[in-house]
Amino acid sequence: MKNIVLAMFLVLVTFGAAFAQFLDSDSTEVTVIVNSTIEVPGPSQALFNNPWYTCVRNFYVSTTGNDSNNGTSASTPWKTLQHADTTSRTGGDCINVAPGTYRQNLIVQHGGNAPTATGYVAYRCQTLDGCHITAPANLNYLFSAFYGGNFLIIDGFELDGTNFQVGSCFGTGDQSYGGRTGAFQAGASSHHLWIMNSILHHCGLSGIQFADKEYFYSIHNTSYHNSYTGPYYVQGSGISFVAVQCIQAGGSNCYTSAISGVPASAYSYVPSGNDTATFNQALGRYAPFHNVVAWNVVYNNRVTTNTTGYQGSGIACGSHTDGNGIIMDTFLDDPTNTYPYPYQTLVLNNVSYYNGGRGVHIFDANNVTVANNTVFDNITDTCITGRSTTNGELSQQGGVNNVWINNVSKPVDDIHHQICSFVAGNGGNSATTDINDSYQNNVITGLNGSPCLYDNDRIYWSCSNNKCNTDPGYVNATPGAAGDVNGNSVGGTWIPGNSNFAITGSSPANNYVVSPAPSWMPAQNVDAGACHHSLTTCPNPGTTNY
């Protein structure tokens, strides 16, 4: 097996530049694939075939392998993913995993060394979503990274929490690994983590749960049927970024650990490479955004009351707050809870539906841009809608300098008549006052076709800058039905409706976007919502299992 450096070719496509770089097993042949199609939310075969990262060295894992092998060729693979995580790992290493079912978990402590195409360690299934990873035991995470597991990519896996035996399918966080206060390390969480083209389901907390560092990326995934009960925590969501904390050397509002330890806690990180490069998603560049949730499908994530987790019972009905599709949650440092996260986060081109909580929820978080998302029939958890508070498919509760543009929202009324297309205000337990938020070119409809506004957001929102009381014209979207016992969410009982969120030719979302478009906006985003008007079906969840 030779060490192989994959060539990269810049190809002009209809929606911008795309890299073509894909190695076929042990061959040195490079296949150039021109991706001329429109991106669709969910796992992407085009992105999987043409990753922006480059493999300098290739290693192999197979269900028929042996950890005594050298792992350097497809004919001498290792048997376990964990065996690949050694001190010999370095940027440009790719762990190629053969399709099959693996009852094992992965804790990465040896990642790459730089935010560049050859700086990451990538764990990559050889067939898109053909590697089915199931839980071998009760775990915090099925896949995780901590301490030195920085600059890591997970690409093309199915992560299955095996009926909620696992906290989160993939993620990182200080509390899970006892960091922050010990001499071993203050700040166990890893940074520069990517999960791409993957399907995550049946995890008790969240499909994706990132916390306590930054440079987190969730791109083209499907996260469903998570959050039913928290084995170690209380509640979760389909995709959750919580207590995101900056690590820049000398950065304003960046917590700096006073505790020295090994390995280093990365609070003196100096941005470089893709961190600072001009926005180009085909090249893995998202500056000025430090955290990105883009092109994901999130559905049927909900908290339930009647599921018993291995660490205790389900969550009492009156305590339900989450089960959201996507949440950006409490962007304050975890150690002191006093430093607001100062850098930008992007939530772009996602489709969120049938979740127990909100479709997209920004809670106590600043500098978040929410753009071109499509939401429908969320807040289906009757434990949430049964309370006196008003909830929104799109929800802004506490935040400064947040931007909401080009989103499409259509709620389904419930018996309590408390679901809005959009809710904005200081809200709930948020410690942050809404200041300087902005709302443009959003399309909303439903019982409360005008947004439900409170505090300063009554000033920031205008129906002259958005389309209120306007049905977005989905091709075929019909409500689902959640089980219900005496007003309590049953969760697992779910009768899906139709979930095609492509927009019709006469849709008010057609060609309704902020103009001029921001410099970072993908060229295909000429319509409000996540589904381009040329699509007949949208999204591509990669699964039909509810």
Image: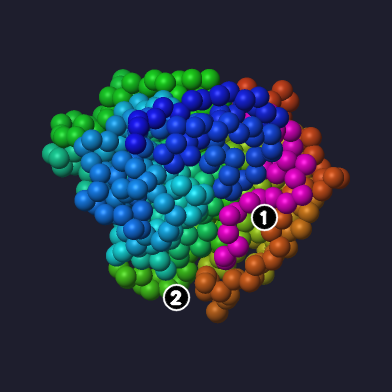
Position of the N terminus, as image quadrant, is top left
Is the residue 326 above or below the residue 7 in the image? below
Give the residue drawn at x 58%, y 31%.
32
Q: Position of residue 374 (x, y in %)?
A: 66, 47
Q: Is residue 388 left or right of residue 130?
A: right
* Label 1 crowd bin: few (<14), some (14–19), many (20+), radius 10 Å: many
Disc number placed over residue 8 in the picture, else none: none
Q: Amino acid at mark 2?
A: Asn
**Looking at the image, what colour scheme do you see?**
rainbow
Is the residue 220 above or below the residue 120 in the image? below
Q: Which residue, given by chain and number where applicable, does mark 2 sit on?
A: 306
Q: Is residue 71 left or right of residue 154?
A: left
The mark nearer the N terminus, 1 or 2, is: 2
Give 258 or 154, whichever is nearer the viewer. Answer: 154
Label 2 residue SS: loop
Q: Position of residue 395 (x, y in %)?
A: 58, 47
Position of the C terminus, as image quadrant, is bottom right
Gap in Å between the C-alphas at discs 1 and 2?
A: 25 Å
Q: Position of residue 430 (x, y in %)?
A: 46, 46
Give 379 or 435, whichever is nearer the viewer. Answer: 379
Check if residue 525 falls in the magenta segment. yes
Q: Is residue 231 left or right of residue 458?
A: left
* Label 2 crowd bin: few (<14), some (14–19), many (20+), radius 10 Å: some
In the figure, residue 462 lies in which quadrant? top right
The magenta stretch is 521-546
Q: Position of residue 279 (x, y in %)?
A: 55, 24
Q: Which residue, given by chain and number where applicable, does mark 1 sit on?
A: 376
